[in-house]
Amino acid sequence: MKAAIFDMDGTLLDTERIYQKYWNISAKDLGYKITEEEMLLFRSLGHSFAVELAEKLTGSKDAYDEIRNHRKELMDPIMKEIELPIKPTVHEALSLLKENGVKLGVATATRLDRTEEYLDRAGLRNYFDELISARSVIQGKPAPDVYIYACSKMNVKPSDAFAVEDAPNGVKSADAAGCRVIMIPDMTEPDEEDWKHIVKRADNLLEAAKYIIKA
């Protein structure tokens, strides 16, 4: 394998739980009745898909943008102040992959400038050859666009790349692009549908890295 492409929030950074907390607070503040289980469906979900899902759940076509904007008002000041938590074994895993000549990239729903800022603050930026935001493609996850673009930027075929993801929308995106997908569960375990799209469930990033090297 020539490349490994990682999701960021929930995979490299232990930030998905923070996001989910404030998504739920924001929805409740605005009077939208979305359960915590339903809110998990929005993880890594591209904007157009998220607008559609929120309308289905609430009946309002403006619900997603209203909830997102309020969530940012609540959460952004906090994210600027905290030490960003990283996932277990992340440094060991990325170092091992680099030592074995694997190109490393990030494919995230987060905008590019914030991706770079977060990885810098977490001490992870220098591991990666390319950072790719779904904001740079037509459709975000679960569409394959961001992984197809990432492979193009990294000059590898999708079949020569592993994708490492924590959530179903990312798993589907990477598989649809033609990558081999490893899922490291963060907030939910893979269900029957997820297993159709993954080649490996790993407990942590180091386990995933060792699997990639042996592939």
Image (tube, rainbow, N blue to C red):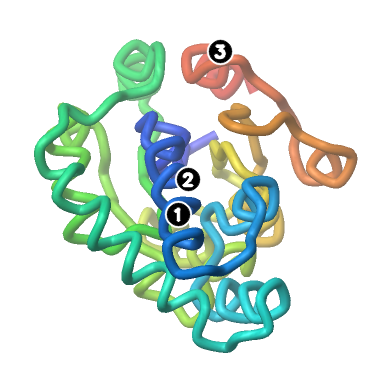
Quadrant in which residue 42 is drawn = bottom right
The secondary element bearing badge 3 is classed as helix
Amino acid type of the residue that numbered disc 1 sits on in the rendered structure = Trp
The N terminus sits in image quarter:
top right
Q: Are marks 1 and 2 in contact (CB under 8 Å)?
A: yes
Q: Are marks 3 and 2 in contact (CB under 8 Å)?
A: no
Q: Is residue 133 above or below residue 99?
A: below
Q: Is residue 116 above or below residue 132?
A: above
In depth, the one of 200 and 141 nearer the eye is 141
Identify the mark at residue 20; answer none if there is no mark: 2
Of labels 3 and 1, earlier in sequence is 1
Q: In the drawing, does residue 54 fall left or right of residue 128?
A: right
The label nearer to you, 3 versus 2, is 2
Name the residue: 15% across, 32% down: 82
Q: Position of residue 115 (x, y in %)?
A: 25, 51
Name the residue: 46% across, 33% down: 11
Q: Which residue is mark 3?
A: 207
User: What's the CA distance linking mark 1 and mark 2?
Assistant: 5 Å
Amino acid type of the residue that numbered disc 3 sits on in the rendered structure = Glu
User: What's the CA distance linking mark 3 and mark 2?
Assistant: 26 Å
Identify the mark at residue 99; answer none if there is no mark: none
Amino acid type of the residue that numbered disc 2 sits on in the rendered structure = Gln
Give neighbour class at mark 1: few <14, some 14-19, many 20+ (Cα, 10 Å): many
Q: Position of residue 146 (x, y in %)?
A: 48, 64
The answer, for residue 126, to whether it is visible in the render is yes
The secondary element bearing badge 2 is classed as helix
Q: In the drawing, does residue 113 fall left or right of residue 108?
A: left
